[in-house]
């Protein structure tokens, strides 16, 4: 399978790799240069993995829905209702079996486990569970789970870098730096965004923007982007017309949108965790194993898709339309509510997938809807609805990911629109500040805290 196609050739290099490290260290006489060269290799592997993962999602989606494209809501709307409801449930059953018998947990791991490996695991992740996690995410997203594909690629990139570090017996500091290289190349390859990938790895994984970490992480991000472009091309993920941004007097409107985006981000995070607790409580009450939760979760997602088929899968169709200003405000508001519900159910039920894409979808739709209110207030000099969608996209994603700087860069690289930077910076600054004040943590840190609390309660029994 594409997510695991690297397993056999990588394992065949095991014994050679163990003899290679001492020679390289003697030859290069610099651990920093060694990590940079290894980062290039990890970046290439992660770029190939990103291509394979996208192909696997498309194959599953084509089998489940008859279309492997990002835009497939119209195809779903024409299908029989029973098929729309049962398809995510069948996908949930396959994910549940994979989680139970291969991954060995109650949900597929993701970015929080990458951060834990950085902090406590010496930068090492196991290869087979990492490939199984990618497969679970591909089954989830292809079957319609309303999550993102970038988080699983980040986990897979970190897994490949961790495997490399373990095979080469790198010391923990070098292993952690190589893991950051894997994360950077994964983000860069997924979004065609080498700058954002570099800063995200430094901001979230390394925890600082120090100069010594810049070279290997940047080289890995550039390599991952170059490899991914062989398949995806070099165009931005959301190729939209360059927007005409209004005067600086419009910044208060973007600040107000930041407050709205913060509330959407809070609803996203709190709703996901409440739904996770609700599924766990239902499993205990009705006596079914918790690992089977994706089955009833899939039924709920399918039922929601009968009314709003755009909630299925990654959701970039709704994001692109919002950035083009092609969706009426009433429809955008419906999409915000439906997407919040679908994401909460998908996450709470234990499907595989990330939170990058859902936060972009929610931000774009909320921002586009906000433009209908802000435009008349600002007057004839107001920006287009697309620029509000773009600001909203970044303003929701930044506090969810806990990475405001890389999110600003990502908004630029995703669209190729440099004129929106002041508005995006304003919305992100306000949104991140409000979420920090009201909630105090990102989605990833909250997941880590919840996992630690569960482990503590189990150990105390």
Image (cartoon, rainbow, N blue to C red):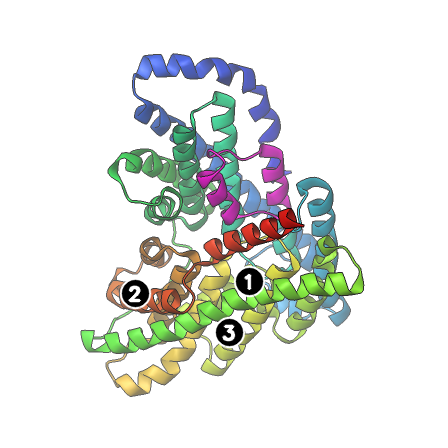
Q: Which residue occupies the extreme left position in the image?
A: 248
Label at residue 429: 2
- Upstream in sequence: badge 3 or badge 2: 3
Measured along the vertical axis of the image, is residue 242 above or below residue 30?
below
The x, y position of residue 118, in whole percent, is 45, 39
Q: Residue beneath label 1, please?
A: 71
How many residues crowd around disc 2 within 10 Å: few (fewer than 14), some, or many (20 or more)? many
Residue annotated with mark 3:
336
**Front disc: 1 or 2:** 2
Left or right of residue 30, residue 271 in this image: right
Q: CA distance from mark 1 to mark 2?
A: 32 Å
* Membership of 230 in magenta stretch: no
Q: Where is residue 411, by image quadrant?
A: bottom left
Q: Is residue 2 visible?
A: no
Q: Nearer the viewer, residue 249 or 434?
A: 434
Q: Which residues are magenta?
A: 107-136
Say which of 128 and 2 sits in front: 128
């Amino acid at each position: 399978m594409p997510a695991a196609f690297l397993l056999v050739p990588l394992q065949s290099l095991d014994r050679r790799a163990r003899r290679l490290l001492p020679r390289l260290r003697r030859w290069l006489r610099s651990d920093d240069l060694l990590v940079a060269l290894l980062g290039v290799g990890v970046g290439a592997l992660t770029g190939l993995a990103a291509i394979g993962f996208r192909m696997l999602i498309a194959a599953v989606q084509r089998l489940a829905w008859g279309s492997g494209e990002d835009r497939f809501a119209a195809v779903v709307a024409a299908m029989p209702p029973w098929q729309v409801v049962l398809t995510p449930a069948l996908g949930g059953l396959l994910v549940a079996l994979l989680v139970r018998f291969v991954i060995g947990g109650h949900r597929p791991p993701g970015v929080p486990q990458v951060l834990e490996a950085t902090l406590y695991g010496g930068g090492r992740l196991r290869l087979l569970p990492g490939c199984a996690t990618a497969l679970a995410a591909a089954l989830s997203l292809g079957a319609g789970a309303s999550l993102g594909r970038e988080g699983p690629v980040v986990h897979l990139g970190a897994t490949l870098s961790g495997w490399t570090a373990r095979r080469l017996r790198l010391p923990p500091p070098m292993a952690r730096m190589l893991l950051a290289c894997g994360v950077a190349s994964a983000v860069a390859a997924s979004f065609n965004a080498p700058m954002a990938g570099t800063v995200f790895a430094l901001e979230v994984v390394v925890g600082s923007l120090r100069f010594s970490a810049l070279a290997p992480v940047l080289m890995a991000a550039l390599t991952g982007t170059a490899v991914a472009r062989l398949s995806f091309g070099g165009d931005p993920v959301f190729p939209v017309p360059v927007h005409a941004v209004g005067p600086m007097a419009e910044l208060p409107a973007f600040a107000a949108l930041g407050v709205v985006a913060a509330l959407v981000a809070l609803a996203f995070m709190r709703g996901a965790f409440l739904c996770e607790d609700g599924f766990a409580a239902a499993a205990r009450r009705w006596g079914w194993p918790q690992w089977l939760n994706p089955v009833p979760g899939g039924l709920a997602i399918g039922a929601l898709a009968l009314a709003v088929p755009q909630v299925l899968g990654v959701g970039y169709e709704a994001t692109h339309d919002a950035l083009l200003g092609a969706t009426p405000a009433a429809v955008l508001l419906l999409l915000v509510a439906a997407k919040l519900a679908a994401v909460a159910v998908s996450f709470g039920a234990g499907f595989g997938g990330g939170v990058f894409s859902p936060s972009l979808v929610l931000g774009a739709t909320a921002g586009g809807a906000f433009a209908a209110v802000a435009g008349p207030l600002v007057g004839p000099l107001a920006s287009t609805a697309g620029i509000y969608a773009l600001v909203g996209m970044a303003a929701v994603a930044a506090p969810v990911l806990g990475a405001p700087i890389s999110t600003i860069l990502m908004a630029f690289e995703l669209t190729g629109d440099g004129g929106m930077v002041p508005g995006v910076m304003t919305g992100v600054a306000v949104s991140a500040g409000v979420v920090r004040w009201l909630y105090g943590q990102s989605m990833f840190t909250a997941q880590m805290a919840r996992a630690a609390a569960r482990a503590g309660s189990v150990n105390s029994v």
